[in-house]
Amino acid sequence: MNSFEILPGDAESTVILHVPHSSTVIPADVREGIVLSNDELAAELAAITDTHTDVIAIGAANRAHVRPWRFVNRMSRLVIDPERFPDEREELNAVGMGAVYEKTSDLQTLRTPTADERDSLIARFFEPYAAAMAQLVRERLAAVGKVTIIDVHSFPNKAKRYELHKSDARPELCIGADDFHTPEELVTATREAMSSALFTGEIEVNQPFAGCYVPLDQYGSNRAVEAVMLEIRRDVVAANMSELQAATAALVDTVQ
Ligand SMILES: [Zn+2]
């Protein structure tokens, strides 16, 4: 099984829905490097997986007038986290939650890899993922001239111990925006499209999670690559799936 999957959209689509954290799959040899019991691992996966964010993306793709492309991680973020920097730029390295997690979301030991084991996980899973996403973005730019990446996540109602900004608000929707790649109109379009899927419409920008995913070869250099992150609180995901699918499709239609 590939560690990720690219599901094609329409030839004229400018949108890529990116789903990095919805899977619970861990290859057997990677599981061997994790020190948790099976019960502890199941609890950690329940805590850390963005369950059903892939279903939001499927429904949005099916409902959008122009079908967006989808890039979906088919492995758990406990294998590697494709959204972290693989080097010292990553602020979550400080708590053992960089690209290769060493701690659980409760800051217990998850694995204690040697440098070689860490490098091997990066080479097998992180680098091919980043390269494939970067290539997809370049292909879409060549085909249609601009790309909007919509990153689909969920987050728990209560802060996990690993989080660095635990005192931030926990709105129904956190919009992750980047100074360079997220124009104000994209933030506005996201607010307007997504508010219909929320209970009361509580939305914050960049809290409790900040930023959005852009391939490094475009990051900070190409304004034709726009990006926004949807971090949806998990009680909203549990209650409002079809509304979230419709709202995300409306966002896709707005930015196409
Ligand atoms: Zn996530």
Image (cartoon, rainbow, N blue to C red):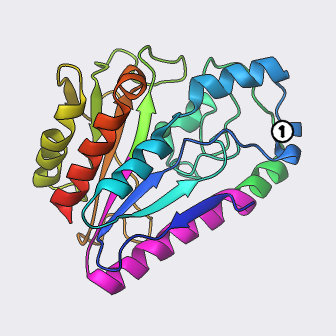
Q: Is residue 249 above or below residue 204?
A: below
Q: Is residue 122 left or right of residue 194?
A: right
Q: Secondary structure at mark 1?
A: helix
Residue 171, horizontal then vertical, whole percent? 27, 22
* Residue 149 placement: quadrant: bottom left
x and y percentages locating residue 200 in the rendered image: 18, 19
Give the quadrant of the C terminus.
bottom left
**Label 1 CB less than 8 angstroms from ligand 1:** no
* Residue 210 can be seen, yes or no: no
State the residue at coordinates (48%, 71%): 134
Image: 255 above or below 143: above
Hey, which quadrant is residue 142 in on the image?
bottom left
Q: Which residue carries the number 1 mark? A: 31
Residue at 75 percent across and 60 percent down: it is: 1
**Per the image, is 138 magenta?**
yes
Q: Kindly tell me whether residue 103 is visible in this rendering.
A: yes
Prevailing secondary structure class for the magenta stretch in the rendered image = helix
Q: Which residues are magenta?
A: 123-151
Q: Residue at x 29, y 78 (%)?
A: 12
- In the image, taking residue 176 as reference, residue 120 lies left or right, namely right
Say left or right for 173 vs 85.
left
Question: Can you say whether 236 is above or below 205 in the image?
Answer: above
Q: Residue furthest bottom?
A: 142
Q: Choose top left, top right, bottom left or bottom right for residue 10.
A: bottom left
Q: Is residue 73 magenta?
A: no
* x then y, percent, for residue 143: 33, 85
